Image (spheres, helix red, strand yellow):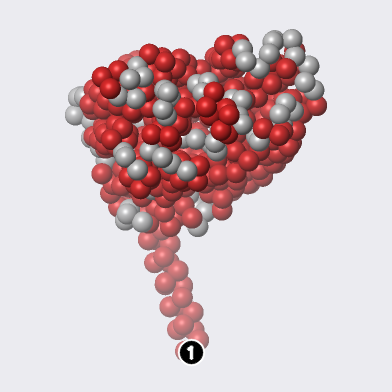
Amino acid sequence: MGQDAKMRGDETGSADDKVETINVEDARLQRMQPPEFIRNLTPEERARLEKVLKRKIDLRLLPAIIIMYIMNYIDRWVIRLISPSKKLIKKWGVRTNAEVGNLLSNNIAAARLAGKVGLEEDLNLTSTEFQTSVSILFVGYLLMQIPSNLFLNKFGKPAIYLPACMTIWGLISALTAVCTNAAGLMANRFFLGIVEAAYFPGCLYYLSCWYTRKELGFRTAVLYSGALISGAFSGFIAAGVSWGMDGARGIGAWRWLFIIEGAATIAVAIACMFVLPNFPRTTKWLTEEERTLAAWRLQEDIGEDDWVNSEEQTFWQGAKMAFLDPKTYILTVLLFCIVASGTVTNFFPTVVNTLQEGALGNKENKNISLLLTAPPYVLGVIVTYLNATHADKTGERYWHITIPMWVAVIAYIIAATTTSIAPRYLSMMLMVPSVYSGFVVGLAWISNTMPRPPAKRAAALAFVNAVSNCSSIYASYLYPKSADPHYTVAMIVNCCTAFIAICTATVMRVVLVRLNKKLDAGIWVEGAINAVPGEGAVNGFRFKV
């Protein structure tokens, strides 16, 4: 009798649970009903309004973030394009700028070489002190990306937050010009890394809050084109400052580099504060109908309201969810290997300069190296745009990552096995476009794979980006002067990491295909749309593979 009562109780409990589940599902499906404004639109009217909305956001968002990223990235390139002084050649035994130091990350690099008396000599720095002042930037840069993205998600106003951070890092960079000793320089660089950490992962999250998953690839390519543009042309700016302003108003060239770069950064930041949108629900210069449509596009794409859900997340809950998801670590390995395979771009003038041992002339003709460095980056911009656009059009990610990485593998094999001018320069023309085009689609794949909740997406983007940049730590050791001209070890390492990236992308594809099959069967999948069982199939959400 007691057992019968227990069974009846279980049946009752089961029925209650079933009713509760149905009620939850009904509530979620009710939230998936379009707002009245959108329900009353014909398909043609909605398509027209979406086109107008996207054009308005594109025109205000994309040019601004490109310019901001150029300012963020340009100072990381100058050492690679300014010729070392004879004093430094004698002191350090270097022939090209990239051989002077480790992977250098800011105007501090150019300052080391700029003018008759560079930063290192002016501040009486030892080699160890200089390298420490360079490397310490990465400490703050890597540590602050996740907290910054979580704060951005909670604050909800990127049009204020990102330009404010940019203004601060511009001020800190300009203040480098007043440093008088190693301690002051190191403190300056540490705080600069903390503030600069907000920008790139913040922009990746920013884009994912405005564009659907099928639109992210191209927009991510637009953002990253800032790095490619700066890589192609920033050397001319730095060289002009170094050669034309040394001693002007009694100020050395290395100090002018920081002053000019910092002032330009602050000016751009202030202008962008009046141009950038916030998030769809917090952008005041959109009409109420446009805000509704912008928010609904994302909700329809995923099955969940981005902004409402973000308000329900605690500050650290997103990080916890990202760290507990195995997909985070698969994507981290993938992006780390892609970035690691592209470390050659950090020393590209060094590698290009090896061509001069052949028919291009002697090693002293630096102008030839300067000219030959630009075309791979110009081609890289074109290929990156085309690859990302096609990835968005087809909704496919895997092949748009792995095919470029296979091209990179071939390029590194050619570079490692020959010093002949034509095939070696061909390999260099392939290195930059292949790595960058695969990397951009890989970045979009993060948001595609972990779209909701937004706090989790913000944490995942920051974590993956931070870890992937750790390849900068060892990269400089792959390009010693003794390895010139083949740089065989570097090319082999780059080749291997590109191949590992291909293997990791394959693992990611297998995982996502299996999850999509579960969604096809109406089985609940963690991180898909945080829905009750079956809603994934009802709303048609699928991971991009």
Indicate the quadrant where residue 494 lies.
Answer: top right
Residue at left offset 25%, top offset 23%: 267
- Name the side, left or right, on which 237 lies relative to 418: left
- The answer to which of 70 and 330 lies nearer the viewer is 70
Give residue 233's position: percent from left, percent from top.
47, 16
Give residue 45's position: percent from left, percent from top.
33, 16
Residue at left offset 74%, top offset 10%: 359
Residue 297 shows up from this direction: no
Which residue type does callout 1 highlight?
Answer: Met
Residue at left offset 78%, top offset 16%: 420
Quarter holding the C terminus is: top right
- The answer to which of 350 and 272 lies nearer the viewer is 350
Give residue 529's position: percent from left, percent from top.
44, 46
Element type at mark 1? loop
- Name the side, left or right, on which 74 lies relative to 165: right
- The answer to which of 82 and 216 lies nearer the viewer is 82
Residue at left offset 68%, top offset 28%: 408
Residue 440 in the image: above or below residue 354? below
Give residue 100's position: percent from left, percent from top.
56, 32
Indicate the quadrant where residue 383 lies.
Answer: top right
Residue 243 shows up from this direction: yes
Read off the residue under disc 1.
Answer: 1
Residue 245 in the image: above or below residue 398? above
- The answer to which of 417 and 484 lies nearer the viewer is 484
**Residue, far right:** 417
